[in-house]
Image (cartoon, helix red, strand yellow):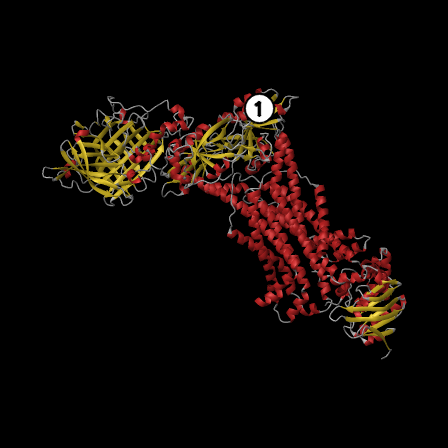
Amino acid sequence: MRNKRLPPTAADRRRFLLRPVVGSLLALALPGVPLLARAGGHAASAEATAYPPVVEGALLQFPQDFGAHPQFRTEWWYVTGWLREAGGGTGRHWQGAGEGGAEGRAGGYGFQLTFFRVRTRIGEDNPSRFAPRQLILAHAAIADPSIGRLRHAERSARAYPGLVEAGEGRTSVRVDDWLLEGGDTVLAPYRTNIETDEFGFELVFEPGRAPVLNGKQGFSQKAPDPLNASYYYSRPQMMVGGRMRIGGTVREVEGHAWLDHEWSSEILPEGARGWDWVGINLYGGGGLMAFQMRDGEGRALWHAGTLSEEDGASRIHGPDELRFTPLRHWQSPRTGIRYPVEWEIELAGRRLRLRPLIDDQELDSRASTGAIYWEGAVRLFELGAADEARAIGEGYLEMTGYAERLAM
Amino acid sequence: MNTRLRHLFLASLLRRRLATALSLVAIALGVALGLAVQLIHGAALDEFGRGVRLLAGEADLQVVGAREGFDESLYPLLAMRPEVAAASPVLEIEARLPGRDDSLRILGLDLFRVMQVQPGLMPRVVATAGRDVDDAGGDGRLAALQPSNLFLSADARALLEQPLRVDGRQQAAEGNGRAEGELQPPAVQDGWLLAQSGLRSLRLRVAGEVPGASGLVGVMDIAGVQQHFERLGQLSRIDLKLADGIAVDTAMRALAPLLPAGVALRVPEAAASEAGTLSRAYRVNLTMLAAIALLTGGFLVFSTQLLAVARRRREFALLRALGLERRALMHGLLAEGALVGLVGGLLGVVLGHALAGGAFRLVGGDLGAGFFRGLAPSLQVDPVLSLAYLLLGVAAGVLGTWVPAHEAARVAPARALRAGEAERTGLPQAKVDGRLAGGLLGLAALACLLPPQGGIPVGGYAAVALVLAAAVLALPALARAVLPLLEHGRSVLWRLAHARLSATPAQAVVAGAGVIASVALAVSMAIMVSSFRVSVDEWLGQVLPADLYVRASSSAASGYLDPSALATIAAVEGVAAVDTTRLVNLRLSDTEPLFSLLARPVNAVGQGEWGLPLVAGSLVAPAGATLPATWVSEAAADRHRLVPGSVFELPIGGRMQGFVVAGIWRDYARQHGAALIDSRDYVALTGDTRINDVAIRVAAGVDPHSVSETLRQRFGPEHIAVALPGEIRALSLEIFDRTFLITYLMEAVAILIGLFGIATTFAALATTRQGEFGMLRHLGLTRGEIGRLIALEGALTAGLGVLAGLLAGGAIAWVLIEIINRQSFHWSMDLAVPWLALGVFATSLVVLAGGVARLAGRHAMQRSAVQAVKADW
Amino acid sequence: MLQLSGLIKTLPGAPPRVLFDALELQVAGGECVAIVGESGVGKSTLLNCIAGLEPFDGGEIRVAGTELARLDDDGLARLRRRHFGFVFQAFHILPHLSLAQNVALPLWLLQQPEAEADRRAREMLGRVGLGRRADDSPHLLSGGELQRVAIARALVHQPAVVLADEPTGNLDPGRAMEVLDLLLEQLRARSAAGILVTHSRAAAARADRVMELVDGRLHAVRHGS
């Protein structure tokens, strides 16, 4: 689909999302809705069923909340992780091998897959099975150091029974033959299958521990105004096993992964322009999630983070305990956009460093969903007293809202 | 050779300018007509093919079913198959535009799938004045999902924003009672399009454009189309893109077993070839007419060259005596013919393109036959086709010269140089054996027995050619048989003319061959068209027994009636009885065009009164049959080899249902076959209670017009069309006549070329016979009498040609009716000869030929009698 | 039968050439006058003027009492039809008619009943020695025979004047004299006035009178000279 370039408006500036894969598609749903509702005669009745608000204090129930929440405007299941060829590691305690090294463990691939669900409020009274009430979008990528960039692919479709679905009661999302399912019980494994022309993976994830609730018991505030919030839990330190194909080569792989599941109706803070997020599996068995929301000038609007332990204990860090500082930029030769690919994160007095697996993990999907952003595998280091860096974990960094600046 | 060629041969063409010019024109016309038919048709097919390619995009395979569609449950099944990389469902609607006589093709699409398979159909939001982008739904992705948003091609938008000028025949077709020349409102007003589903108007917002699409097409979200046009659960098509490395054949084998009855898999190109099949018989028909025009042109070259050679016999003898080789002489003459053919061909190619261009403006790309409605093809220069027709022109020139050149090359120089020889060889002494003509007729009869090849009646066309050849060859024999009957004329001119023609029947061949071909063509077409028209007229009377007909739209479009509407109609005061028809189109195989299925309440109106023109079987369903009954059209019976009592299986409601054939009826409306079943059977099989047409009988003494008015008010005049049978009949016959308009034009051209033949022959003859005319002037004939003599000879010659043409035309008409039409279109007709018209035509042609001959022979009258009798040899 | 008095004809040109300078000629019925002269002197033109096929500038031509100058083109045609017979050098026998039909042609033009025309044509053919070949096609005849047919055609309708322009020009000398004698014999038998234009002194010698066309006038040439 060709994306028509339009002069920026106030609405445009608000147009960015936590998960930009849906890019303009999701963004459009937001400012335009009331007007859209007027557009079609049939949309009028849809206004009766509004998006439910995200409120503090609602208890998340599992496995029920592993499934979809179709009443909410947006929802995503987001799996990131690191893979290595099987046999090189030591089974479950993967973190032992590389601990302490200045550069962390050698080799490996980053992988990412995301399933989005969007409620459009279009055609909710239409008995047609094609009625575009729910859209499902999926995105998958492999960060391959051997080529120095991402391999990625995406799918988008309207929900259609048996073909494109986001099921309730357990995790079950699919777009044609791409799927992510599991979570039948709190500790039950997940399974995914992704096939593209260029690559594919068929992986099983073992959570091993209960979900980590972010924010206030799963109520994750995104801005000073609690209206901008989501229900959000993470599953760090999932064990991964399965097969990965790059081109015609299939490899048995193993590794670790991180799953985020988040649903919301009003997530965007006023004036927000971009988002930097990390999800890191720590070598010590814990997990770190942190994000900052930036305004048009690049200043942080909001910070939040969760540090969880292997035993399930977790600590929530509020805005005052977190600071993101860009250290090094990389400019995309394709789009000319500069991304801060190395960061310093101050977390309750600790000084942490993020370094990318490869610099070029930019995703340019202007040809399809319209968004350009950076999403890639990173290592986390901790600076000691003498500024010596020690690798303490591996995970993913996502940076959005750098492209729009260019467009302006 | 070049200088020699130029001076000795080609220069001779300039000396006889009239004959050369007429030959040129004849060849040019033949080439032009043939080329124009091909160009027009080619352009229409191309345009159709472009449409097909656009719609199919990158699809490797298409799943197609009946026109009404098939159950969408097939879609997830196919989409999940490993052979399939992407599946794009399409629901196509021919949306009726209330208050207007045209319709809009709306494609209901899933834009997420379109992106993968048919990128050319992606819609784009256009912000228009007074509406900002957000109002239209942002950059268009969600706008394109809105159920009431419509995206139009530039062509469609341009047309629909304009008022539609009411055309007389369309007006009658829709029965809207508007006057011709009146303007119908624009379909798009203030950014909204008014469409109709059933009897309901619905407003669709024009939200943008389809930049990649051409033609009259709109795009909507598939869910919106299913909802608005009440087609829930239905798809028209699924376009498939195959996974890498999967061959089309492999995929077809793997997927075909998944398809329900009446749904087929095919490659997208097959749609274009299906369109080609639809119109192929018609196209071949027209091409044959053009070929006859070209053939007549070839005859014309033949006669002019033959006469020229005769006249230049002494010249050739001299050249031979001076040492010109026999072969060089022949080559030189053939070069003359080739030059005439080449120049005529070039003229014809130019004229053909001009004709095609004109035809697009005047009658549209279907040559008036209605095969490609809604297409706006543009004229393309086709170099290969043009070259082919140019070569045909050259071939006509060369072949026309072949016999005369051969004749000239055989000239014995010594004999030809002797005085007096010229007198005798002024005319060819063709030895024509009547038995040869008889043999050709026998072959023609045998050719009629051949079955059609690929739907084209090859044998029939061969028979036409053979009959024509036989008629030309039989002309001397005919002259010998007929002329003695005319011997006893009083006038000396008559005696002279008669004597001359009796003594030289070959002259009749030379001058009359073109006349025979063109008259035979015209006469056969006239008889065929007359038979067809009379039969259609009679048929219309039979199939339209009611007093009033009501429909929401044509069966292809989105208007329909439902049982409640029927109840409303039945309740109108003055309505005595109603009879309904549901017309759907089934797909019997992946290669055949769509088959029509009519569901009607059999016997509801009383046996024998339900307007089914049976040719075999019975109107009553066979008693005790376990299968439901069907009545099939002649085309269906021919194509599927059915006789009363046969079992015929039809894919209805996704499965094959057997029917027992109760009768066969004549159907001129559906060339590809139709079957009629009882609507109770239909509803039981499909659950579809929609109705396309309602036939109303009004109570005795009630004016149908008042019932019609009531119905219009009840449903809204813009939603329904009410027509009297007389109107439908008049309209149908008008369409019929329009279809044959182009054939009349081609006949006229052929006749014109035939008259050219008379003109050139007599111009040439007059030159060779100047001595004779000079002597007659000495003997006391006035100039006027000489002129009348030539006219009389022309008329007599043409008369013989016309007579042979009439006989051949009669035979060809029989072939057209019984073989060609039967095999091409599968319809029978009753022979109806338009005697009066043929008589007038033949007489006027003879008179005209006399005039033409006299005009052409005026050279002979102008030249001084004194010089003429001088020993010019 | 034929009377030319003061016939004047000039040919256009610069200066105009005087072809006939008050030319005088009278020919009685049954008499044959031969006209000789050098090529281009106007012998054939004289015949054409007599036949009304070419206009002249002064004087008068009377044929059977009718003055030519008073007739229009159609009138001249009717005059020729009734009162003239022609014998051409190139015969001009119509190939598509039988000999009898060729001979009957003048009678047809005079609206004679077909049977009567046929009878008289056959009788005439008999007189020229071709009676048994009346139904033959002209293709089968030699040059001499064709010219006999032409003579029969020239005389069958009993014309007042027979004009013969080099009738023997296409024949060999033996045949030429034979044909010439036949023509003269028939002229006398039918009392027609004959004018014979020829290059041949021998042919001219057979005529009753021989005139030489010199400087636009006719001068009598003595027999035997």
Q: Is residue C124 left or right of residue A261?
A: right
Could you tell me which quadrant the C terminus of chain B lies in?
A: bottom right
Chain under disc 1: B
> In this picture, is B334 found above or below B150?
below
Give the residue at the far bottom of this rendering: C225
* Quadrant holding the N terminus of chain B: bottom right
Q: How many numbered tags mark residues here?
A: 1
Nearest the eye: B129 or B117? B129
Which of the 4 image quarters holds residue B110?
top left
Q: Which residue is mark 1?
A: B711
Task: Name the quadrant containing residue B252.
Answer: top left
Above or below, comparing residue A239 to residue B430 in the picture:
above
Secondary structure, mark 1, is helix
Q: Residue at x 47, y 29 (%)?
A: B203
Mark 1 residue crowding within 10 angstroms, few (<14) / some (14–19) / many (20+):
some
Residue B736: x %, y % from top left: 61, 38
Q: Amino acid at mark 1?
A: Leu
Q: Is residue B267 visible?
A: no
Residue B296 position in % (x across, y down): 64, 52
Q: Position of residue B632 (x, y in %)?
A: 57, 33
Where residue C219 sits, quadrant-wise, is bottom right
Q: From this viewpoint, which residue is outermost toward the left?
A: A386
Q: Foreground residue, B182 or B564?
A: B182
Q: Position of residue B724 (x, y in %)?
A: 62, 28
